[in-house]
Image (tube, coloured by chain):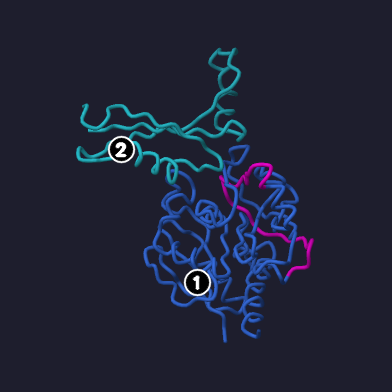
Chain colours: A cyan, B blue
Amino acid sequence: MARVVVDVMLKSEILDPQGEAVLGALPRLGVTDVASVRIGKRVEIEFDDSARSVEEQSRVIADQLLANPVIENFTISIDSPNGAA
Amino acid sequence: MTARIGIVTFPGSLDDRDAARAVHLAGGEPVALWHDDAQIYGVDAVYLPGGFSYGDALRSGAIARFSQVMDTIKAAAAQGMPVLGVCNGFQVLCESHMLPGALTRNAHLRYRSRPQRLRVETGRTAWTNAFPDGAEVLIPVKHGEGRYVADEATLDELEAAGRVVFRYLDNPNGSMRDIAGVSNEAGNVVGLMPHPEHAVEALIGPSTDGLGVVASVLAHLSEGAAR
């Protein structure tokens, strides 16, 4: 079964208020040497055993649905290519 | 003839009934449309209401974009049919690529619900022609993800083309350049975060300025009919 992981991150120029809120909480943990925190999404997709063109389909899913290209970038990694698992 | 304004109900829409009442009070005929029905029953314009379509799963508006009714609305808008997106409706229009930019978490991470002062930057859209350019209005906002963002080139282009339709007078969410609403190039598609349908009656709203938005599209449609 092909397992694909898509990571979606806000583009670097887009403000990430959630990341900033986490950054702001770190001193309360005693952690004071962190410069920046950015929060994104990890999406795990499992294709059917019979699925073809897994990479191509993953790209369509990531580009047209999982990420909004106006504000987000994505990376795709294929954990176990079709037939290998 | 009374103009028929379609109002779409998505799973999770909240303001569809308020929008219908606003249309009725302004003298139009509200027509209920359903997300899972590709038919729009010959309506003259469409109002996409606020709420949390599909529970805001993934991103606000991201799933609604793929609903049956949106394909039809997108095609009709390309032919000039007026479409208004309010709050979640604005998010749906951006996710559908019918308007540029995106709406992200409020910069301060807080939900904002309050009457909001706005400037109507242009009366040259189907949904604002009843307002003089620069008119100040008071219309409620209520959202957690209303911070308008786009790249600098897009923002410059919107400004130059007069497509920034509404601007906050005291920015409630960190939107770039205080943008509260924008239009497409033709001016028939407009999206804004504040809720005109919540400012239509003195008893329960902070003003009746929202009526002007519906009155605008009614005037726009009757002009078209007279031509």
Callout 1: few (<14), some (14-19), or many (20+) C-alpha neighbours within 10 Å? many
Magenta residues span B131-154
Amino acid type of the residue that numbered disc 1 sits on in the rendered structure? Gly
Quadrant hosting residue B198: bottom right
State the residue position of label 2.
A54
Circle 2 chain = A
Residue B196, compared with residue A72, is above or below; it is: below
Q: Nearer the viewer, residue A54 or B25?
A: A54
Which residue appears at 34% of the width and 33% of the height?
A: A44
Q: What x and y, as percent, mark residue B208?
A: 68, 68
Q: Which mark is residue B6?
A: 1
Amino acid type of the residue that numbered disc 2 sits on in the rendered structure? Val
Which residue appears at 62% of the width and 44% of the height?
A: B149
Residue A9, compared with residue B63, is above or below; it is: above
Q: What x and y, as percent, mark residue B182?
A: 65, 56
Q: What x and y, as percent, mark residue A6?
A: 40, 33
